Structures are given as C-alpha cells and as structure tokens.
C-alpha cells in the first residue's frame, strides 16, 4: 500500500520501520520542524526524520497544516493511506480525507481512556495496572475516532514511563501492521468509542514535580515513575537540597516517623516516611547540577542523619 507517514518522536519510529519492513511504499514522511538542542542551539532532527533519511524517504516539515500548502502536498503525494503516530500537530479534516483508505492513528492507550498528549504518563500516574495501544480512524475530535483494533499489556510494578514507552512503541508497530493488512483486504473493524468512558491525558508540566509526602507511598511511587524522563518528581527532604527522583521502591514497611522525614539510610537506599505510615525507598536520584546516581553513591558525598 502507498502510505504517507506522520510522526516525530522515538515512539513513532517503530511504526514507520514496520511499514517499511512490511513492504509498503512510504511516499513521504511529515515530521515536526527541526528544533534547537542543547547549549549550542544547533538544529536537531526528530528521530523520525533521522530514520526516514536512512531509508531515502522524502521528508516534509510543514510549519502549518492549515494554510493550504500541506493539503496540496498531501494531494500531490497521493497516498492510499495516512498513518499518524505522535506527530504533534492536529490535522484538519480535508487532509484526513485525502487517502481513499482514510487516515489512522497509533495511540498509546486503550481508548477511550487517556485521549490526549501524555497517555503513557497518566496511566502510570493514576496507578493503572494495564494499558495498551489503539489503532483508530482519525476524526475531527481529538483521539475520538472509531477503533480498528487494540492490544493490551500489563504495567510492571516498578516500570516507569520511559521504559513503558519503548514497549508500547513495539506493540503499536505490531498492531499497526495487523490493521493495515486488515484495511487492505477489507476486514478492518470499526468500533465506535464509548464517550461515557473517555478520559483526558493532559500535557505534563513542571508544576507536577514537587512531591507531597503526605500522600501514600504508592501514590508517590506512581508520581516518580510517571514523570520520567520529564519533568521528574522532585523533593528537598533528601539532604536539604533539591533532588530529582528517578527510581523508588515501595518497601511495605511501616514507620512512626512524620511524613516527609528520613526514616533510614543505608546501602539499599534512603527510606522516607509517607502519609500512610509506609516507607518509600529512594534508589536513584539526581542533585541539581549533578548526574543521575544510586542513592548509595549519593550518600557517600552527602551523609544524612536520620
């Protein structure tokens, strides 16, 4: 099938790679414009652009999808199907309707739950034990189109958003391959979403970082896991300086210490009392201006008295 692909981050690369490996003709790739990166502000390619270049796929980076230029380009490319995966831009209906097989999206949640920009993060933040991917027809409303197929997967008890994203990218590519085959042979399902069950996964912000230790150990653990790699959960109760938390563990142990105080320190980590009387063990952290390290390594240079 002749496919136009639209995507930007690493998550989308797996889907694009699978289309290529399955033998489809990818007539072009739309991706976000190059952005300045690091201190030198050198323009950096998106992961999707980097992969497309290695496969000699034409890359297009329209600034606007609504000025008519993008529509003309899509018509010129004449795709049979458009596949979107974390593109980062909303598509007007006239662009969605160009391909005869329509436009479909690889979304990293079990729709109608977690529509929006950060479904993987919010599934973890909310303590979900299962998530998945949905392949759906795109519609005018955000992530509200009919579902073609879904694949589910459990969320590991200590799995963070970064590692879960990698797994869902692979699962999404697998689901996409099945969906495109079904479309080609005319067996694709079309299941409307139940609007009464829809939830929204808003964009993340730095305001979500500070840890409130009066919450339960489980809630804080979900916060830490859900905010990796950005903006990261942060606290100043460790050594009296701001640190980002990268790995924690619910020990199940109880403590009489006040919430937000250090209950114990040692080679295994830094134990902090939470609002439910349980202990949360910090395993990895990063001090301001420093590198990510184990709690044991941090303690070597920052002795803490309980």
Image (tube, rainbow, N blue to C red):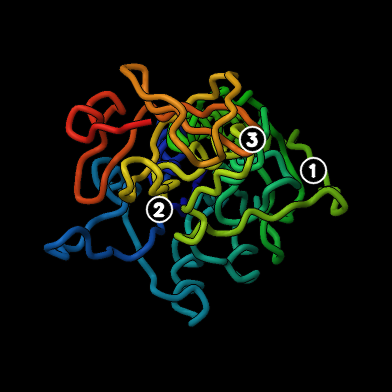
Mark found first going from the N terminus, 2 or 3: 2
Image check: 299 left or right of 69? left
Q: CA distance from mark 2 to mark 3?
A: 21 Å
The C terminus lies in quadrant: top left
Q: CA distance from mark 1 to mark 2?
A: 26 Å
Q: Residue furthest left?
A: 40
Instruction: Determine whether the residue tagged by mark 2 lies in a helix, strand or loop.
Output: loop
The quarter of the picture where residue 220 lies is top right
Q: Nearer the viewer, residue 155 or 26?
A: 155
Above or below, 78 relative to 146 = below
Residue at the image point whose x is 22% and y is 60% from the top: 37
Q: Are marks 2 and 3 in contact (CB under 8 Å)?
A: no
The quarter of the picture where residue 181 lies is top right
Instruction: Determine whether the residue tagged by mark 3 lies in a helix, strand or loop.
Output: helix
Coordinates of residue 93 in the picture (x, y in percent): 65, 69
Q: Are marks 1 and 2 in contact (CB under 8 Å)?
A: no
In this figure, which residue is indicated by the disc labeled 3? 179
Image check: 77 left or right of 240? right
Bin the neighbour count of mark 1 within 10 Å (Cα to Cα): few under 14, some 14-19, many 20 and up: few
Residue at the image point whose x is 38% and y is 49% from the top: 236
Q: Is residue 133 visible?
A: no
Viewer-side label of 2, 3: 2
Coordinates of residue 217 in the picture (x, y in percent): 59, 33
Coordinates of residue 64 in the picture (x, y in percent): 45, 76
Q: Nearer the viewer, residue 264 or 123?
A: 264
Mark found first going from the N terminus, 1 or 2: 2
In this figure, which residue is indicated by the disc labeled 2? 8
The quarter of the picture where residue 203 lies is bottom right
In this figure, which residue is indicated by the disc labeled 1? 190
Q: CA distance from mark 1 to mark 3?
A: 11 Å
């Amino acid at each position: 099938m002749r496919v136009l692909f639209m995507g930007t981050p690493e998550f989308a690369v797996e889907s694009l790679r699978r289309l290529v490996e399955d033998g489809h003709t990818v007539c072009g790739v739309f991706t976000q414009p190059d952005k300045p990166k690091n201190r030198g502000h050198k323009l950096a390619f998106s992961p999707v652009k980097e992969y497309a270049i290695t496969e000699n796929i034409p890359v297009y980076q329209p600034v606007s999808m609504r000025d008519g230029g993008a529509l003309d380009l899509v018509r010129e490319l004449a795709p049979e199907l458009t596949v979107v995966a974390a593109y980062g831009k909303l598509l007007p209906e006239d662009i969605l309707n160009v391909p005869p097989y329509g436009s479909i999206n690889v979304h990293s949640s079990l729709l109608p739950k977690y529509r929006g920009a950060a479904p993987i993060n919010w599934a973890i933040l909310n303590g979900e034990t299962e998530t998945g991917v949905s392949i759906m027809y795109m519609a005018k409303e955000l992530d509200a189109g009919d579902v073609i197929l879904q694949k589910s997967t459990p969320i590991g008890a200590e799995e963070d958003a970064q590692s879960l994203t990698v797994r869902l990218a692979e699962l999404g590519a697998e689901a996409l391959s099945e969906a495109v085959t079904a479309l080609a042979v005319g067996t694709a399902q079309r299941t409307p979403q139940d609007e009464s069950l829809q939830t929204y996964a808003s964009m993340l912000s730095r305001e979500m970082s500070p840890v409130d230790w009066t919450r339960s150990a489980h809630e804080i653990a979900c916060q830490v896991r859900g905010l990796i790699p950005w903006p990261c959960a942060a606290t100043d109760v460790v050594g009296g300086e701001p640190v980002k938390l990268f790995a924690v563990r619910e020990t199940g142990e109880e403590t009489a210490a006040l919430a937000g105080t250090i209950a114990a320190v040692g080679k295994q980590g830094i134990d902090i009392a939470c609002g439910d009387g349980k202990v949360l063990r910090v395993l990895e952290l990063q001090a301001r201006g420093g590198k990510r390290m184990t709690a044991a390594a941090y303690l070597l240079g920052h002795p803490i008295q309980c």
